[in-house]
Amino acid sequence: MKLDRKEILKALETITIAGEGKNMVESGAIANVVTFGDEVVVDLVLHTPAMHIKKRAEDDIKKTIFELVSREAKIKINSKVEVPDKPEIKGKQIPGIKNIIGVASGKGGVGKSTVTANLAVSLAKMGFSVGILDADIYGPSMPIMFDVENEKPISITVDGKSKMKPVESYEVKILSIGFFTAPSQAVIWRGPMASKALNQMIFDADWGELDFMLVDLPPGTGDIHLSIVQSLPITGVVIVSTPQAVALADAKKGVSMFMSEAINVPVLGIIENMAYFTPEELPENKYYIFGKEGARNLAEDLEVPFLGEVPIVQSIREAGDYGRPAAMQTGSIIETVFEEITRNVVQEVVSRNENLPATEAVKITTMAGCSAVKK
């Protein structure tokens, strides 16, 4: 049997690489195809280092050749990653902050703020310096979760300028609109007022040196999100969802927003919250109250990393209400769960920083759209 190179190229025109609109041949991902009798060598060039995209591309090539050309073909794929040089970060940076991670959800009530708080204390326990910007303007919950709802940021002078000093709890620096309003007071602001308040907490604060700033974003895909990506070069975003279809549909929109060409913020992965319930008296049993592995399957469909799952445990809710994040419970299953998820987040950040260009802050150009800052 002798394989036909033209026939193989024609077959490969039927598949694309995740995130690219053109087919593999047209986009240049297929650099070369060489045939030797029943053997074929495919040179594949990728522009993203993500292992799951590389594996998916290689599997698609093999499957397509087997199905459209010959099931007897002996296939060898030489894969190479070519990543553009990192440009200088554009937009306004906060001096001293190495990584800015957005924590988002398409839908409210999925436990995004709880996950943010527990990621923060887990990072702090690992030895990182951490801060939280509570950008959930209309539902700020960090002051309660860190037992500092009666605290107020003080004013200090830095280089001749007056700055807010973030409130510190459990070795995490926090700023939230909740510090500036009464607990029973509703924040009745239009978008520009909320955006101005956020900018003050971002740029008029003395955050000091931070390895990670976690930005607790409000639900949805609205004005606050645009304000954040306009103000800051976000390193990446973590999406939190529960397993049921209603939450997943909104989480998918959240991923779509950040991965859109206009925003272009890397999605570090998806965390599944309220994944299952295990009664204390039946530790081997798992009850999938909201559905099983919905967020895991969504991550696979969207080809983004799955960072882990958080079970329904009463102590998580209690700990949040009492102002001591559950991940601080030494020796508990929750400590282990959040340690694993946090390690996965850190690994994705390291991989992203090593292999992808720095994120640019976004410039709002019209009422209907955005574009990256170009200087």
Image (spheres, rainbow, N blue to C red):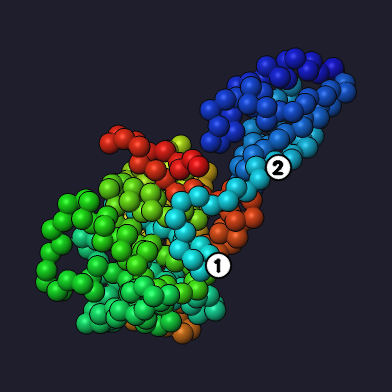
Looking at the image, can residue 328 be seen? no
Frontmost residue, 110 versus 47: 47
Residue at the (11%, 71%) spot, across then down: 184
Instruction: Kindly give the residue lying farthest to the front in the view shown.
Output: 160
Residue 242, position as x, y percentages in the image = 35, 56
The correct choice, above or below, for 198 with respect to 264 in the image is: below
Residue 374, position as x, y percentages in the image = 49, 40
Residue at the (34%, 80%) spot, across then down: 156
Q: Amino acid at mark 1?
A: Arg
Point out which mark residue 173 bears.
none
Q: Secondary structure at mark 1?
A: helix
Find disc 2 in the rendering and name its residue: 81
Residue 72, position as x, y percentages in the image = 78, 25
Could you say which quadrant of the image residue 263 lies in? top left
Residue at the (33%, 74%) spot, across then down: 162
Q: Amino acid at mark 2?
A: Val
Q: Secondary structure at mark 2?
A: strand
Could you say which quadrant of the image residue 178 lies in? bottom left
